[in-house]
Each structure stands twice: as C-alpha cells, then as structure tokens.
Image (cartoon, grey):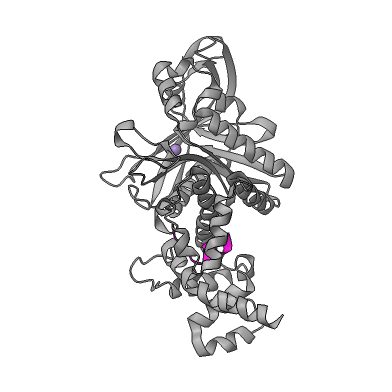
Amino acid sequence: MAAQAARRPAGKVTEVFGNDADRQGAYGLLESEDVTGGQVGASMFEACAERCAGEEFVFCAVDGSSLTVTDSSGDKDLGSIGTHSQGARGVKVISALAISDKGVPLGLTSQVWWKRTASLKKRIERKHRDLRRTEEKEIQRWLDTMDQSRQVMSQHAPRTKLWFQLDREGDAWPILQQADQDGHWFTIRGNHDRRVILEDGRQTYLRSLVAQQPVVTHYELQVSGASRRTERVAKMVVQTCNVTLDFRNKRTKEHFSKQVNVVLAREQGTTPSGEKPIEWLLLTNRPVATAKNIKQIVFGYAQRWRIEDFHRTWKSGTCRVEESQLRSAEALIKWATILAAVAVRAERIKHLSRQEPDRPATDEFSPVEIRAITLLRFGKSAKKRLQDSQVPTLAQVSLWLAQIGGYTGKSSGGPPGSVTLTRGLKEVAAVVRAFDALEADCD
Ligand SMILES: [Mn+2]
C-alpha cells in the first residue's frame, strides 16, 4: 500500500487506489481490527533503523504535530485539537525523524499517537499541571517516542548513536533526565532560565552565566527557507559553558542535578528585516571543547528543520493526509502512518539528490521505476539510454522525475523540490503499473 501511495500520493484512499479491488483491499486493511497502526509503523521504523546501521550516529529530530479533520456532525471517533471553542477534531502525534550527518532524512524511528479526550482536558483544568504525575502529562508521549526510538535502534543498529534534537517543548526535567539513556546523545533547546549550582555551592541562573562567557567561535550557518524564514547564510556568534543544573519536581518537591554543556548561538548582522535573529540556547551532552564540536552541535540543531519539512509534505504539500475521509481514529492513524512513509521518501529523494548526487539511482529507486522514468522523460531515445550498462546517478533520475512533474528550473531557480518530485512520481505510477502487469503476464 505504501508503494502504491508513493506512486500516487494523495490524501484520500480513493485517489490513491484507482481500481475497485485495490480500494477494497486498502479499506479492508485500514478498517481491520487485526492490524493496528502500531504494527504498520513498526515495519517502517525497523527499515529506518537498518538504514542507520552503518552510521556512527544519526540526528534524530523529535517533534509534535496534530492531524485535524472535518467532523461537522461530531460522530467521528476523534479527540479534540486546540481549544474547545474552535471545535477542531483529530489526533495528536509525536514523530522521531532520523537524519544523516549530512542532513539527509533516513526515515522515522518512532511515532506515538493519542487522542486528547474530554476527561483528560477536564483533569488538566482541575489539577494544576505541575501537580500531575509525568505519566499523566503529554511529556510522557515525548518520553515514549524517544524510548521506542532507542529500542528499535538497539535491535537493528546497536552500534549507532541517536543524537536527539528537541525544540523548547523538550526542555522539561523528565526529558533531560532520560535523554542520554543507553549512551545516546541529545541537544535540547532551553526554554526556561534554569537554576545553576556553581562549584563553590552558590546558585545563579543559566542565561546570565553563559552570556558572560567569552565568544569562542564565529561561524556561518546555512539557513533553509520556510514560510516565515528566509533562506540565508547566517553569521553565528557562539558562547559556551559547562554547568550543573538544578531541577525540582514540583509535585514531590524532590531536587536533583545534572551536568550539561551549554551552547548559546546567536545570529549577528545577517537577519532579514521583519525576522527575529536566530538565538538558540542549547543544552547538550556532547563535548564543546573545539570549534568543530560546536559547529556540529549547531548544525545538528538546524537539522531539526527537516522534521518541520516532513510535517509540511505529509499534511499539505504532497500527501494531504488531513483530507482523508476515514471515520475512525484507528483507520486514520493507519492511513497516516502509510502516508508518513511516502512523505519521508519525497523529502529523502530531495535532499539525497542534492547532497549525494553521484550515488547510483538504484539506491533509492526500483529498476522498474528507473525504466519508467527514463521512458517518460526521453520517449523514443530512452531505449538507447536503457541499453547503456551504466546505472544513472541519483541526481540524474531525480531531475528527470522532477521534469516529468513539470520542473523547468526557471520558476524557483533552485533544485527540484518535493512538489515537482511527487507530481513526477504520480505520472510515473501508471507506467510502473503497466510494467508490473506485463511482467506478471510473462511469469
Ligand atoms: Mn515543536
């Protein structure tokens, strides 16, 4: 189903599966109680971990999102999203996206889904949030996502370290406490001005302490563009320190401490007007001794943008998962999990063809797909290219695919993006199906 959805990405099941039998089969799986969304996801997470196995480490961006669907009659089995008065319904999800040290998405290592129920909402109102146990809070979903990522790695890529990358939502003591479990690495953007214990026992606060440190390095960060972020090369000024943080569990009044390295990276002089300068206060268990160490920490945190791109492709750009008209949460989650694999693939092709253009196309495309893309792109002269014994490169095939999807290189001026690539994949779908059918006939 994921292969089919990758060829014709769309939000609705009926758009992806053209014929009756396929469509019946798809609904059968989505509505079956024997196959859960978790099982569909598990095979995807394992495949991702296997892809990570050769690496010393992979960045692992963890972030939350929600899928909102129309439910005007209120009879769909979904939870509430946002404030009650807006009446939006849907499911919430936290995803963990593995990314190579060069910034290429490798796949998802975990997704945790839940419905926010009315009773939980009432509990939140009744009990002050600090007084609830961790298991009752949404923080627990972050912990579960990270825990599942560690588990799949220990089984399929035991030598590869995860380098978790979390935004300010991740600055919570239960997360900081567990982020380096099993020897994994983390960078968490600080949200709170935390209490710090100095060597002589005195206390101070994190922000002022790091801001007093000498500037250790200046360097340039490639900023990727987004809706409210201009693509640019940002000049970053960096200060660091090593601190012992002091945490207090407000429920139990218990104190505990943790040593972390702190990196304060601030953009200076390159911020476009109307935008805020980049300013990241990063907490990490990675060394900050050399300029190379520090550069890698800031680069790693910038790779967190990849998960925002993934959310965009998944929800709007290509897959439009929110357009699915499925009625039960379980079916929606299963379908969304399949579309997540598709969205990651589009993002992966996009980055891989930019970062490692000379890799053989067979690393990412099946032989049938390469034949179909060549045929659609070159028509009659494709035969000669296909007889050529040399395997085309990833950059070549991605470009042909984007050209099939209408890419001219003129409108954006940049390399192919996920929209033209997936439009190309849709066009290629029919030809791939024809090849598959022909081959089945010959067997
Ligand atoms: Mn977030």
Quick one: quadrant of the C terminus?
A: bottom right
**Is 8 colored magenta in this rendering?**
yes
374 is higher (above) or lower (below) than 257 = below
Task: Kindly indicate the quadrant of the structure image that contains residue 237.
Answer: top left
- Which residues, given as a range, are shown in magenta? 1-11
Task: Kindly indicate the quadrant of the structure image that contains residue 145.
Answer: top right
**Is 267 colored magenta in this rendering?**
no
Left or right of 247: which side holds 191?
Answer: left
Front one among 12 and 395: 12
Front one among 223 and 1: 1
Task: Kindly indicate the quadrant of the structure image that contains residue 259.
Answer: top right
Residue 102 visible in image? no
Residue in the image at 36% along x and 47% along y: 70
- The location of residue 234, given as percent across then percent down, is 39, 47
Residue in the image at 42% along x and 28% along y: 118
Residue in the image at 56% along x and 75% along y: 432
19 is higher (above) or lower (below) than 132 = below
- The location of residue 288, given as percent across then percent down, is 57, 34
182 is higher (above) or lower (below) than 373 = above
Left or right of 434: which side holds 46?
Answer: right
- The location of residue 173, given as percent across then percent down, is 53, 23
Q: Quadrant of ligand 1?
A: top left
Q: Residue furthest left?
A: 274
- The location of residue 47, given as percent across then percent down, is 66, 53
Query: How many numbered badges does the structure rendering display?
Result: 0
Residue 131 visible in image? yes
Quick one: quadrant of the N terminus?
A: bottom right
Front one among 307 and 326: 326
